[in-house]
Image: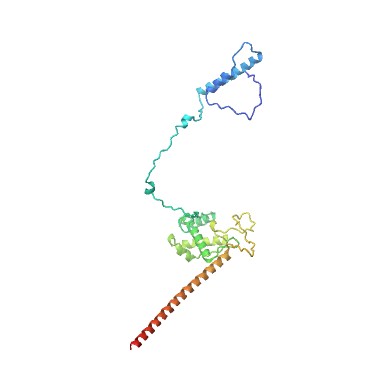
Amino acid sequence: MSRLSIRPRPLDIHKKLPIVKSVKDFEDDNNDTAPPPTSTSTSGNTNNTSATATRNSHLLRLNSSLTDHDTPEVHQAPTKKSASEIPTPQFVVVDTYERDYSRTFAQPNSYLRARGARAEIGEFVEYDLDNEDEDWLYEFNKDRKIFTPEKFEILLFKLEVLDHKARERAGLITPTLGSPIPVLLQLDVAIEALQAQTIRFAVFQSVYNYWKDKRERWQKPILRRLQPPPPVNDTNPYNVFRPREKAHRLHTRRMQRRENNVQSFEKLRQVRRNLDQAKTILEALIKREEKKRDVLDSEVNLQRMQVKYKVSV
């Protein structure tokens, strides 16, 4: 029988598998595992010897087939000799580098803070057309192509930015989205601000009307970063980006906390106006007192001249 007479043994999953790195490992294994035949061996030893010889013959045939056809590449670990041959970069010390290239940056004492570059009326556009915008543009350009989608995105983005600036000047920036946000940008103001776009009045008016109708339906800006966050007590799971701080805080008599809301902003604006009025009044008082001093000096000089001439006469 050609079946190997090997006693079955349970597999050990924790035992490390040997890795064959060279063809010589088979020969070493054969030399180590094949015991020399002795004349005093029993029947059991004879069976084990024959089984080992049969297994070694299978391994030798597999080895010869690999070496004849496709010999796998064996990646050997780099030795110490190859590691010492790693090239190192060369450099040259320039003594006059500090004098030739002076520093253009001075390290400040405070931390450096930077804000992300956001385009207001620049070249970068943050708005992308949605399905509603694309449908309207397709119907608008149905007869003939009047303007491109890129131009349409630029107009919608700049209309949103101009309307946001108009709300800032009017003091209508809400901290949370509690009520509908109206449109304050008028058509004539938008045309005056976007004169560099070189668009005909009829086309611009159509875009403005579409943008205004969409804003009235949305009840909020169509540009995401200009939309105020929802209130804290909003339970709608689809409204994200809620403010972390509480809407109403308990105020104590000892410590009054200042909140950044519309009422505080209006109070600060009133204080600013009062200070400007006080400054104007003080400047007017200073001018009046200077005039009074000049008049008094003139009267004193006149009296001195009169006294001088009377004495001389």
Which quadrant holds the C terminus? bottom left
Q: Residue furthest top?
A: 39
Q: Quadrant of residue 32?
A: top right
Residue 141 appears in the rendering: no
For image coordinates 51% across by 23% down, the residue present is 67
Q: Residue furthest front?
A: 311
Q: Please tell me which residue lies in front, 305 or 136.
A: 305
| Rendering coords of residue 6 (x, y %) | 64, 20
Residue 190 left/right relative to 98:
right
Q: Please tell me which residue lies in front, 95 or 163.
A: 95
Residue 208 left/right relative to 10:
left
Q: How many numbered marks appear?
A: 0
Q: Please tell me which residue lies in front, 309 or 235.
A: 309
Residue 303 appears in the rendering: yes
For image coordinates 43% across by 78% down, the residue present is 293
| Rendering coords of residue 21 (x, y %) | 53, 26
Which quadrant holds the N terminus? top right
Q: Please tell me which residue lies in front, 11 or 312.
A: 312
| Rendering coords of residue 46 (x, y %) | 63, 14
Relative to 161, is 313 above or below? below
| Rendering coords of residue 196 (x, y %) | 43, 61
Relative to 308, is 144 above or below? above
Q: Residue furthest bottom?
A: 313
Q: Quadrant of residue 45?
A: top right
Colouring of the image: rainbow
